[in-house]
Amino acid sequence: MTEKFASNLFVPTLFSELLLCGRDFCQSFARSDLWLKLAWRDVRVLFERSFIGPLWMTIQAALWTIAIVFVFGGIIAPVKEYVVYVAAGIVLYNFITVIATDSSEIFIKHRIIIHSHPNPYFAYILRHIGFSGIQLLFQSIVVAVAMVWAQHTLSLTALWAIPGIVLCVIMGVFTSLLFALIGLRWGDFRFAMLAIMRLGLFVTPILWYPDNGGALKKVAAQINPISHFVDVVRQPLLGSVPSTLNYVVVFTAIAIACFGSIWMFAKFRRTIPMWV
């Protein structure tokens, strides 16, 4: 009898927590002026003593692209074809890396504001996504310059890159929320993700082609979800439509991240002020 009564209490409690999460989401999106301004402020603070400011983001991606093409261009693929492939891959991988590595400290970094101002928690996630998006915009200049230099002509197929970017951003939102909550309880999580993402640059088809190098590389690319998120943006820019497998993996990963992040947010949302 007691167990039945407790189980009946659990359902409305979980439902009420989900409602609170939904309200948090709505309040955060409604305050877009707040987190967009704060995201741009994060960029300005990062480069406040720099003469060229956020353009260092562009230069960083450009130097990586130039170095990789200098070493491997002409060996893996013709230089003009390879430079666009690498530039798009590097820019997208940098966006994913910022999401994966910096998300674990989102709430910890804002502990003072969390304790002093009753802002919706999801706004801090959107602030981080805004910062990552600004980096993506600045580094996308490298892709545009690479295309001009390589005389690469875009076709209508390139429009498929727009929903691809949207899918990457949606995945970034849910991943940031999930990793931010995990990072609150596991201090080593950020260092683990740093190690994984550094290794991931070499096991993800950023510098190499999945179809070149045997069946093992092709399988590695297929089971690596990051490669599919890169492909839904890069392949349209290169003139081909992403495969069905790309979209199946992408939507599956988004569904898992969405369920996991919302469940954890509903369960641990009230404890965030105590954990930070």
Image: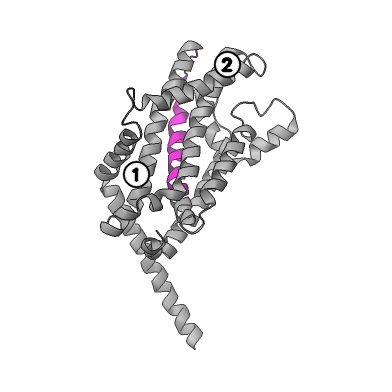
Q: Position of residue 108 (x, y in %)?
A: 40, 53
Residue 118 in sight here: no
Q: Which residues are magenta?
A: 152-176
Q: Which residue is mark 2?
A: 81
246 up-or-down from 184: above or below: above
Question: The residue tagged with tag 1: helix, strand or loop?
Answer: helix
| Residue at 31% from the left image edge and 33% from the top image edge | 44
Q: Which residue is mark 1?
A: 127
Judging depth in this view, the residue of 68 and 89 nearest the camera is 68
In the rendered structure, the answer to whether residue 153 lies left or right of residue 121 reads right
Which residue is situated farthest in the front direction here? 49
Judging depth in this view, the residue of 11 and 130 nearest the camera is 130
Question: The residue tagged with tag 2: helix, strand or loop?
Answer: helix
Q: Earlier in the sequence, mark 2 or mark 1?
A: 2
Q: Amino acid at mark 1?
A: Arg
Q: How is the image coloured?
A: one colour
Was residue 166 drawn as part of the magenta stretch in this picture?
Answer: yes
Looking at the rendered image, the disc whose residue lies closer to the viewer, 2 or 1, is 1
Look at the image and tell me in which quarter the C terminus lies. bottom left
Q: Position of residue 101 (x, y in %)?
A: 49, 43
How would you rate the neighbour count of disc 1 (Cα within 10 Å): few for under 14, some for 14-19, many for 20 or more? many
85 up-or-down from 168: above or below: above
Overall secondary structure of the magenta section: helix
Which residue is situated farthest in the bottom direction here? 1
Q: Are marks 2 and 1 in contact (CB under 8 Å)?
A: no
Q: Which mark is residue 181?
A: none
| Residue at 39% from the left image edge and 68% from the top image edge | 15
| Residue at 61% from the left image edge and 34% from the top image edge | 204
Q: Position of residue 251 (x, y in %)?
A: 52, 44
In the rendered structure, the answer to whether residue 2 lies left or right of residue 36 reads right
Q: Position of residue 125 (x, y in %)?
A: 38, 48
